[in-house]
Image (cartoon, helix red, strand yellow):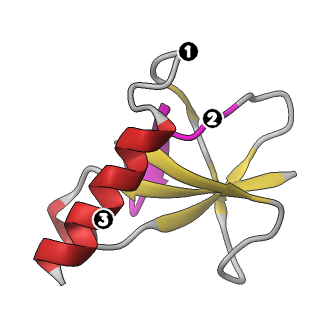
Amino acid sequence: MGYAEVSVNSPIAQRRTFCYAIPSGLSIDVGQAVWVPFGDKLLQGIVLELSRYPSVEETREIAGVIEPRPLLSPLQVLLARWLSEHYLS
């Protein structure tokens, strides 16, 4: 099982990502839009990073894919992260 760092579309989740487990059988790429459980809601998010190991002890699973192809290229993801760190920190 792999893990994804997801930027969740929520005012509560500003300036941080959340680690989600990638269910077996689900193919996920960086820049892809996904549905994730967040509290008691199902929200949209963008996958910013993939890893073999979780960044936190407990994770929830990605609920599904919104679009089969990534909405952002890896270069766009890097630019978005740089802008966030440079201007919002």
Which mark sits nearer the N-terminus, 1 or 2?
2
**Amino acid type, callout 1:** Pro
Which of discs 3 and 1 lies nearer the camera? The answer is 3
Residue drawn at 39 percent across, 32 percent down: 72
Q: Label 2 sits on what residue type? A: Asp
32 in the magenta segment:
yes
Residue interval drawn in magenta: 28-42
Residue 46 percent across, percent down from the top left: 41, 43
Residue marked by disc 3: 82
In this view, the residue in front, 85 or 32, is 85
Graded by Cα atoms within 10 Å as few (under 14), some (14 to 19) or many (20 or more), the crowding at tag 1 reads: few
Whichever of callouts 3 and 1 sits on the residue coming sooner in the sequence is 1
Indicate whether 13 appears above or below 5.
below
Which residue is at a point 63% across and 34% down the rendered structure image?
29
Where does label 1 land, which residue? 68
State the SS at label 1. Answer: loop
Q: Nearer the viewer, residue 8 or 76?
A: 76
User: 52 or 35, which is in the foreground?
Assistant: 52
Q: Secondary structure at mark 2?
A: loop
Q: Residue 70: within the magenta?
A: no
Q: CA distance from mark 3 to mark 1?
A: 26 Å
- Residue 57: x and y, percent? 72, 83
On the picture, is 34 further left or further right than 27? left
Task: Name the kind of residue labelled 3 in the image.
Answer: Trp
Distance from label 1 to label 2 (Cα)? Answer: 9 Å
On the image, numbered disc 2 is attached to which residue? Answer: 29
Residue at image coords 45%, 32%: 73
Q: CA distance from mark 3 to mark 2?
A: 20 Å
Extreme residue in the top direction:
68
Q: Secondary structure at mark 3?
A: helix
